[in-house]
Image (tube, rainbow, N blue to C red):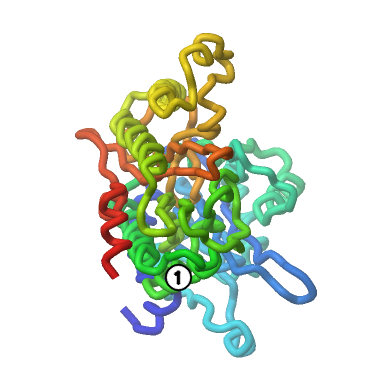
């Protein structure tokens, strides 16, 4: 493969095989005489003429591997001419664009990445669609239907939906999101390899930080150590805004200021993950700033570790998220009793809709992981082999300035679970040993 092409993105080429497989799996779910259209994300503005870094629409990437703005994928598997059953429309480059913005994909490169032979400039999209639509009965369009989505900005997909319904009002419209949710929630071997790479890069960052942290360092200095390690290993950077939270900050679940001094005697909670080839790791670890846990800190730490390990063992095909979280709650309840944070009276009198353990463990234990950190996947359907979940229990004791959460990324298989973060230290004694061997 051409060296220039290899360097087009930070990550190494994935190969068209993954995207051909993904398209094949999608096509099997479409009705006869259907057309499916997916659009790239926009480059979002900041202020004046500034823009945010581009992040591709994950469904488009999943089906094509194209990591460039102003891209549209059109699939029409029953079209009478085979060459138009899969079409990519990409941004047409020029000498001027190359000078000001850098290299954009040629048609040959787009084909090599995606395995799609028919590639056209995106200026041809509106001219070609009427020919395809004439043969189509059903139109599958994409939208962000994630249960936690809060869409306040109109996306390129949403603009296309409005345009398409106005231009072709009498077709039958179908939703792509439920199909993509089911397909993406079960990871292929190649996807597991990419997720493992993201986890391995994250592991390198954590080990680097274990040797760096000491009383007096700033939370943002620790953040800088992570980003150095991540980008040095072909990651675009953090998979999400990193949480580097020392002392009481660790009891703020979404603390991202990362601007305080790490004090001697405090525990430092770090919720960070590297992104690699658009796939994401999601790790949480808690370490003693001074290099040694106090007896109380270690007792809380080991209670969280026990819940994490037992919860991971309950991830299995056929189990449901609801039943799983209920069982994890019972394990946490027992640990909080042992730590004397709860007593039997509080448990006896608890509201079943708001159990007593929620005072110290107020969030869920697991979510899907993949191209999105909170990846698409059904919360009502049973777990399946190929699902990847986080496992992240925590105990937060504000009155003790202590918050501990431990999180791994776990693959469900037919034969059990595979911890993609088994290479990352998590036992309290191992963490102390590394921090005191400098």
Relative to 410, say whether 16 is above or below.
Answer: below
Does residue 300 appear in the picture of this structure?
A: yes
Residue 407 percent coordinates (x, y): 40, 45
Q: Is 36 positioned to the left or the right of 211 in the image?
A: right
Q: Residues within 10 Å of mark 1 (few under 14, many from 20)?
A: some
SS for dot 1 = helix
Q: Is 203 positioned to the left or the right of 167 in the image?
A: left
**Residue sitting at 52 percent across and 82 percent down?**
103
**Residue sitting at 40 percent across and 69 percent down?**
212
Which one is nearer the viewer's eye here, 380 or 72?
Answer: 380
Which one is nearer the viewer's eye here, 190 or 305?
Answer: 305
Residue 367 percent coordinates (x, y): 46, 38
Relative to 386, say whether 380 is above or below.
Answer: above
Q: Residue furthest left?
A: 415
Residue 213 percent coordinates (x, y): 42, 65
Question: Which residue in the protein does label 1 denote?
Answer: 225
Q: Where does the N terminus fall, quadrant-wise?
A: bottom left
Which one is nearer the viewer's eye here, 410 or 378?
Answer: 410
Q: Where does the C terminus fall, quadrant-wise?
A: bottom left
Residue 168 percent coordinates (x, y): 71, 46
Does residue 420 appear in the picture of this structure?
A: no
**Residue sitting at 55 percent across and 14 percent down?**
350
Q: Residue furthest top?
A: 348
For residue 43, what is the image quadrant? Answer: bottom right
Q: Residue furthest right?
A: 48
């Amino acid at each position: 493969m051409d060296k220039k092409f290899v360097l087009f993105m930070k990550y190494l080429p994935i190969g068209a095989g993954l995207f051909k497989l993904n398209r094949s799996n999608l096509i099997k779910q479409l009705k006869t005489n259907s057309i499916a259209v997916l659009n790239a994300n926009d480059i979002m503005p900041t202020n004046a003429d500034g823009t945010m870094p581009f992040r591709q629409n994950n469904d488009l990437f999943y089906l094509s591997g194209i990591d460039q703005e102003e891209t549209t994928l059109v699939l029409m598997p029953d079209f009478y001419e085979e060459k138009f059953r899969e079409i990519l429309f990409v941004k047409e480059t020029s000498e001027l664009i190359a000078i000001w913005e850098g290299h954009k994909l040629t048609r040959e490169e787009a084909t090599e990445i995606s395995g799609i032979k028919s590639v056209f400039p995106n200026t041809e999209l509106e001219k070609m669609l009427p020919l395809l639509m004439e043969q189509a009965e059903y139109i599958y369009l994409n939208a962000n239907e994630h249960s936690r989505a809060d869409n306040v900005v109109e996306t390129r997909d949403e603009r296309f939906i409005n345009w398409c319904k106005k231009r072709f009002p009498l077709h039958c419209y179908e939703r792509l999101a439920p199909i993509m949710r089911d397909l993406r929630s079960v990871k292929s071997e190649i996807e597991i390899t990419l997720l493992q790479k993201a986890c391995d890069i994250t592991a390198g960052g954590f080990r680097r930080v274990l040797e760096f942290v000491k009383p007096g360092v700033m939370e943002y200095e620790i953040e800088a150590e992570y980003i150095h390690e991540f980008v040095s290993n072909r990651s675009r950077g953090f998979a999400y805004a990193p949480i580097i939270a020392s002392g009481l900050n660790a009891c703020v679940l979404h603390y991202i200021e990362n601007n305080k001094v790490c004090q001697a005697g405090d525990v430092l909670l770090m919720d960070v993950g590297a992104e690699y080839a658009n796939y994401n790791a999601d790790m949480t670890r808690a370490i003693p700033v001074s290099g040694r846990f106090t007896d109380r800190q270690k007792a809380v730490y080991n209670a969280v570790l026990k819940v994490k390990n037992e919860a991971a063992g309950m991830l299995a095909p056929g189990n449901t998220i609801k039943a799983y979280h209920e069982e994890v709650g019972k394990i946490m309840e027992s640990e909080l009793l042992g730590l004397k944070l709860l007593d039997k009276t509080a448990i006896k009198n608890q509201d079943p809709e708001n159990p007593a353990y929620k005072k110290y463990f107020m969030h869920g234990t697991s979510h899907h992981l993949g191209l999105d950190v909170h990846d698409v996947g059904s919360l009502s359907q049973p777990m399946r082999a190929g699902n990847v979940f986080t496992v992240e229990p925590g105990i937060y004791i504000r009155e003790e300035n202590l918050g501990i959460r431990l999180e791994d990324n776990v693959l469900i298989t037919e034969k059990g679970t595979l911890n993609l973060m088994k290479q990352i230290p998590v036992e309290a004694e191992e963490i102390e040993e590394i921090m005191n061997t400098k």
